[in-house]
Amino acid sequence: MIGRLNHVAIAVKDLEKSISLYRDTLGAKVSAPQAEPAHGVTVVFIELPNTKIELLQPLGENSPIAKFLEKNPDGGMHHLCYEVEDIIAARDRLKATGARVLGDGEPKIGAHGKPVLFLHPKDFNGTLVELEQV
Ligand code: CO
């Protein structure tokens, strides 16, 4: 059911510093920052030959990653994103096996303008999983 690894997301406190780390220290191609008020984050994507790294910085008062950064003050891996062909079919299959879909269970439009869903980390080895329909 799952396809390619679309991206690995890392939560960061200081986006400018992290951009410089990837662009200047690691020599990677980094996109322009993109504010995602509906998701409470500002995002940049680092393009690697085989996948992407998504850097997330909290945006606004109730950012869903604020608590994560309280627990991980240096930043840390926040989620993995797998591609699926049909997000509704994937959701229904996962729910039938007892996996918990976060929020109201309806796909939201993610940072790439495509439908996404998040799955409970307790059901996936302690890793928050994002599914993106491609
Ligand atoms: Co993501």
Image: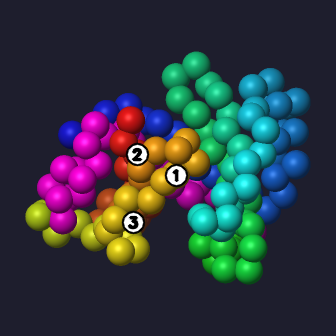
Front residue of 125 and 129: 129
> Pointers 2 and 1 in contact (CB under 8 A)?
yes
Q: Which residue lies furthest to the top in this view?
A: 49
Q: Which residue is drawn at 53% across and 29% down?
A: 51
Q: Name the residue under label 2.
A: 132
Front residue of 98 and 73: 98
Amino acid on which disc 2 is placed:
Glu
**Magenta span contains residue 88:** yes
Q: Does residue 5 show up?
A: yes
List x then y, in percent, for residue 82.
39, 42
Res. 121 mark: 3
Q: Name the residue under label 1.
A: 110
**Magenta span contains residue 67:** no
Q: Is mark 2 within 8 Å of ligand 1?
A: yes
Q: Which of the two labelled residues, at mark 3 and mark 1, occupies the earlier sequence position?
A: 1
Q: Distance between the residues labelled 3 and 1?
A: 19 Å
Q: Is mark 1 within 8 Å of ligand 1?
A: yes
- In this rendering, the answer to whether 54 lies above or below 76 is above
Q: Would you call the spot at circle 3 few (<14 residues within 10 Å), some (14-19), or many (20 or more)? A: some
